[in-house]
Amino acid sequence: MTAFIQTAPFRTLENAVEDHVIPAEKPFSTVIRKGQTARIEDSYGQQAIDTLFYRADDTSERYSSQETMRAQNGAYLSAGTKIQSSEGRTMLTITADSCGRHDTAAGACSCESNTVRFGHGTKYLHACRDNFVAEVAKYGMGKRDIVPNINFFMNVPISPNGGMTIVDGISAPGDYVELKAEMDVLMVISNCPQINNPCNGFDPTPIRVLLWNEEA
């Protein structure tokens, strides 16, 4: 899936209702109201942005990678993808994408997986799972509420035999994805701190998140 839909020309920085710069390696969260559009921008290029979604008024309903891939009959996310919940409902629709494809199979890095993949010297490096746990705690959730996530801008080719490899990202500075909320959703982001594989070009960088109301 490589469709690209251009952002609406009347959606500008001046009429954004929220504008956040998320530092390298840090978590972030905000609520996207039904009808609002969120833009996630890879400001410097080749930066994986691990993302989870929860229904805002009932976080027991949350993003489902399985339902999302099943609904679109494809492994990658791009323009036109309807992001599905654990209840089989559409949470958001990807309405614009300047990158081309996004991963939802490789999961989030953790201290445990870093140790297994890269050696005991990486055990205490910061990881996306730490970010997620810290951020969802603000909403009364914990480790059990961290589900398989979306990796916006992460390049994970899948071979014919089903093998996956994290390789150099294809996103350029300023690439973005826009999502329109189909219900009130809590968006939780880990601006990935990984430095042991090329998902961030071995150099984690800041990202930007903007929100517009329905009329924009």
Image: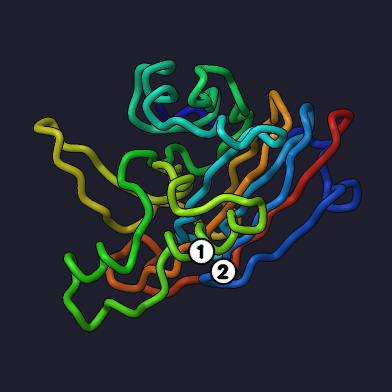
Given contact means CB atoms under 8 Å apart, are the residues at marks 2 and 1 in contact?
A: yes
User: What's the residue at 40%, 67% (across, down)?
Assistant: 127
Residue 68 at what x, y percent from top left? 44, 25
With 120 as the anchor, is 74 left or right in this view?
Answer: right
The amino acid pointed to by label 1 is Asn
Closest to the observer: 173 or 18?
A: 18
Residue 158 at what x, y percent from top left? 22, 38
With 153 as the anchor, is 213 left or right in this view?
Answer: right
Closest to the observer: 169 or 114?
A: 114
Closest to the observer: 100 or 87?
A: 87
Q: Residue furthest left?
A: 161
Residue 20 at what x, y percent from top left? 74, 60
With 212 as the anchor, is 84 left or right in this view?
Answer: left
User: What's the residue at 51%, 71% (across, down)?
Assistant: 25
Q: Quadrant of the C terminus?
A: top right
Q: Secondary structure at mark 2?
A: loop
The amino acid pointed to by label 2 is Lys
Q: Earlier in the sequence, mark 2 or mark 1?
A: 2
Q: Secondary structure at mark 1?
A: helix
Residue 103 at what x, y percent from top left? 38, 41
Q: Which residue is mark 1?
A: 131
Q: Which residue is mark 2?
A: 26
- Mark 2 vs mark 1, CA separation in Å: 7 Å
With 17 as the anchor, is 168 left or right in this view?
Answer: left
